[in-house]
């Protein structure tokens, strides 16, 4: 069983999120500090044109546990996350949205689950006891169709693969390389690779609420083909790689 963890890296991709950064980070710091979780908050600026950079400079100066990086690749959610992975100092990472749609309390749950020995913790907005507030109906319908499609072709019980809000031990992130997705399709590539490659995982219900400020960066029309590409890429690995990328067979595997 994997050992206990020493530091949690909360990776936040930010593109023109100046309106949201202060309340998002403040609530995170407060919740994680109260839970006595050792943490760093790593914000990756994805070519923002608002006051994001100025805010990040001030936050980093005032709080040593807050760091920031600039996406060194082309603009994209997945590239920003990968930049965070490259610079993280923790032995586990949580991907957290800058718009306050995720709950800091769930981050604490993730940390505890990881320390129980799981390699990954996948949040689901659609499990029993999960809570969803103000999810746009068209996006909700597409979400459920896409996730049902993934469940069927991969034969897994996970019902919210597309949810970005997940946690991974660093060995999982390293073991799922190379990551190909520069955009939101990284939210599908990483968990599917982790499952296919034999890492243990657990699912927990989470709370999600629609953003109150700013503009959503996810564009449905732009992402359809990108999601399909990465889904079929992972499917090909599952059925044709002959276990070439699989972790040690002596490791425990959780399917729940």
Image: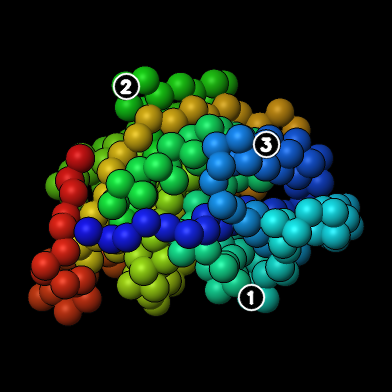
Q: In the picture, residue 29 is in which quadrant?
A: top right
Q: Position of residue 90 (x, y in %)?
A: 52, 63
Query: Considering depth in this image, is 103 or 190 the residue closer to the camera?
Result: 103
Q: Is residue 135 above or below residue 234?
A: above
Which residue is depicted at the point 11% across and 67% down? 250
> Which residue is disc 1 drawn over?
73
Q: Which mark is residue 112?
A: none
Q: Is residue 69 left or right of residue 190?
A: right
Which residue is depicted at the point 38% across and 30% down? 205
Which residue is depicted at the point 56% across and 42% down? 36
Which mark lies nearer to you, 3 or 2?
Answer: 3
Q: CA distance from mark 3 to mark 2?
A: 27 Å
**First reached walking from the N terminus: tag 1 or tag 2:** 1
> Which residue is disc 3 drawn over?
30
Q: Is residue 12 left or right of residue 179?
A: right
Which residue is depicted at the point 60% across and 29% down? 210
Query: Considering depth in this image, is 141 or 127 the residue closer to the camera?
Result: 127
Q: Position of residue 11 (x, y in %)?
A: 59, 56
Which mark lies nearer to you, 1 or 2?
Answer: 2
Which mark lies nearer to you, 3 or 1?
Answer: 3
Quadrant containing the C terminus in the rendered view = top left
**First reached walking from the N terminus: tag 3 or tag 1:** 3
Tag 1's secondary structure? loop
* Cβ atoms under marks 3 and 2 closer than 8 Å: no
Dot 3: within a 10 Å radius of its alpha carbon, few (fewer than 14), some, or many (20 or more) residues? few
Q: Is residue 70 visible?
A: yes
Q: Position of residue 176 (x, y in %)?
A: 34, 70
Query: Considering depth in this image, is 27 or 232 the residue closer to the camera?
Result: 27
> Which residue is disc 2 drawn over?
128
Dot 2: within a 10 Å radius of its alpha carbon, few (fewer than 14), some, or many (20 or more) residues? few
């Amino acid at each position: 069983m994997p050992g206990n963890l020493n530091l949690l890296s909360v990776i936040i991709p930010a593109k023109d999120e100046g309106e949201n950064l202060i309340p998002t980070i403040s609530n995170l710091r407060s919740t994680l500090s109260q839970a006595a979780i050792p943490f760093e908050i790593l914000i990756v600026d994805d070519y923002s044109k608002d006051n994001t950079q100025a805010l990040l400079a001030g936050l980093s100066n005032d709080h040593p546990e807050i760091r920031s990086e600039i996406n060194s690749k082309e603009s994209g959610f997945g590239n920003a996350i990968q930049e965070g992975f490259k610079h993280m100092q923790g032995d586990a990472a949580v991907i957290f949205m800058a718009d306050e749609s995720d709950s800091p309390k769930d981050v604490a749950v993730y940390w505890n689950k990881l320390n129980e020995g799981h390699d990954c913790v996948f949040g689901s907005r659609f499990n029993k006891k999960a809570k969803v507030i103000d999810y746009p109906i068209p996006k909700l319908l597409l979400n459920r169709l896409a996730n049902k499609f993934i469940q069927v072709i991969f034969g897994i019980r996970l019902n919210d693969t597309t949810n970005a809000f997940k946690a991974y031990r660093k060995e999982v992130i390293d073991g799922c390389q190379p990551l190909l997705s520069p955009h939101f399709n990284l939210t599908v590539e990483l968990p599917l690779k982790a499952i296919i490659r034999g890492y243990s995982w657990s699912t927990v219900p989470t709370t999600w609420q629609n953003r109150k400020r700013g503009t959503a960066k996810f564009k449905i029309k732009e992402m359809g083909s990108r999601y399909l590409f990465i889904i079929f890429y992972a499917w090909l690995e599952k059925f044709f790689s002959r276990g070439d990328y699989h972790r040690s067979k002596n490791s425990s595997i959780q399917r729940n």
